[in-house]
Image (cartoon, grey):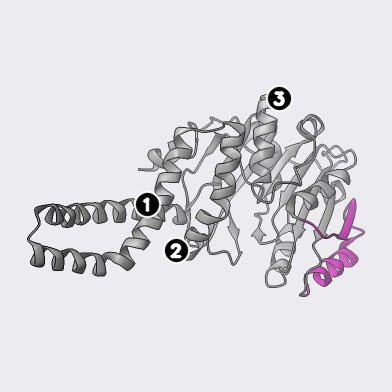
């Protein structure tokens, strides 16, 4: 079954890694590459301290890390936590920049790119992700063979499709590295995209440069977000909101694939299953009354068809619900 889902999401066979690619070993002698870590955030007071604490314990020389926090004018204490962290640790890092800027996620990501200086890598971390101490060593090691490298993350009840490193058509930016040469040639994120700006960037980098995009799922990171992606409500929200945009983007760029078609069918089946759950009783009752009143054969066939279709839709809906339990991006 995992192979089926891997095919849908474009997961290629695992990459065999050499010891050098599997994990970068910091030198701590001034020769380690400079890395810019960008973190867009908004109203993450419930988890930002935990995320910052995990970042602080990264196994990498802090004087070769530039931290850039872009807060979209949070209405809670998120920005205060960021300022306190910057004041407390500003002498340990190469630089800590804290900014407030109205705008969407692509705008915040571009601010990080514009402040990267001569960094060899730019790493984005979502402000509700708990990174592992070795996350930078994993990213830098894989950056020798991939221009864009992501590490998978999961909620407590989710599981990755694989436990290896695979090549992808795209990766999300929850914890993702971009090499400087890829950034220079691909440019900035598209601020006109309200969703999937990371998907767009991966497509552009792959099309323009033939960039190899990797996903490391050996040890997923922990996601603390309050998102409802795995719930029924969350799946429906994404179906009507994110997928509607993504479908337009796919058709606009002619990036239609069998995976996209199957994914859309599964989403539609989930909606149809929910609709049938509400309508099954009155629909069946109506057909039974009509059969009793008219003894019409066509009506009886309609009852039979409805009885056959509903289990099919429920089955597809169950398959779709599995996506909420698997971390794939």
Q: Secondary structure at mark 1?
A: helix
Front residue of this view, candidates 325 and 258: 258
Q: Which residue is mark 2?
A: 232
At 18% from the left and 63% from the top, the residue drawn is 287
Q: From this viewpoint, which residue is outermost toward the front?
A: 294
Question: Residue 83, how many percent across, how many down?
Answer: 86, 67
Q: Residue furthest right?
A: 91
Which residue in the structure is indicated by mark 3? 209
Q: Where residue 269 is drawn, which disc sits there?
A: 1
Q: CA distance from mark 1 to mark 2?
A: 13 Å
**Magenta region:** 77-103
> Which sits earlier in the primary sequence, circle 3 or circle 1?
3
In the rendered image, the vertical position of residue 2 relative to residue 147, given as above or below: below
Give how far apart the Cα atoms at labels 2 and 3 are: 39 Å
Pick whichever of labels 2 and 3 is earlier in the sequence: 3
Instruction: Indicate the secondary structure of the residue bearing disc 2.
Output: helix
């Amino acid at each position: 079954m995992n192979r089926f889902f891997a095919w849908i999401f474009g997961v290629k066979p695992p990459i065999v890694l050499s010891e050098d690619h599997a994990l970068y070993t910091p030198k701590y002698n001034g020769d380690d590459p400079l890395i810019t870590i960008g973190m867009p955030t908004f109203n993450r007071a419930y988890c930002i301290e935990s995320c910052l604490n995990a970042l602080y314990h990264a196994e990498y020389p802090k004087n070769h890390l530039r931290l850039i926090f872009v807060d979209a004018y949070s209405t809670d204490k998120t920005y205060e936590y960021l300022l306190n962290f910057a004041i407390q640790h500003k002498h340990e890092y190469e630089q800590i920049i804290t900014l407030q800027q109205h705008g969407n996620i692509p705008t915040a990501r571009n601010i990080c790119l514009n402040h990267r200086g001569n960094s060899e890598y730019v790493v984005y971390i979502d402000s509700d992700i708990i990174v592992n101490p070795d996350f930078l060593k994993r990213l830098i090691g894989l950056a020798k063979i991939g221009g864009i490298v992501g590490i998978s993350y999961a909620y407590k009840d989710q599981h990755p499709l694989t436990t290896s490193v695979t090549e992808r058509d795209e990766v999300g930016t929850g914890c993702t590295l971009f090499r400087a040469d890829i950034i220079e040639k691909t440019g900035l994120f598209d601020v006109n995209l309200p969703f999937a700006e990371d998907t767009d960037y991966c497509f552009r980098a792959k099309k323009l440069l033939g960039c190899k995009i990797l996903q490391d799922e050996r040890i997923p990171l922990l996601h603390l977000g309050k998102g409802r992606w795995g719930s029924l409500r969350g799946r429906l929200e994404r179906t009507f909101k994110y997928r509607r945009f993504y479908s337009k983007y796919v058709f606009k760029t002619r990036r239609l694939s069998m995976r996209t078609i199957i994914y859309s069918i599964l989403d539609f089946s989930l909606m149809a299953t929910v609709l049938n759950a509400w309508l099954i009783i009155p629909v069946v009752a109506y057909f039974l009354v009509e059969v009793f009143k008219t003894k019409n054969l066509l009506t009886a066939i309609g009852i039979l068809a409805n009885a056959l279709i509903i289990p099919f839709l429920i089955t597809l809906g169950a398959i779709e619900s599995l996506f909420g339990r698997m971390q794939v991006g």
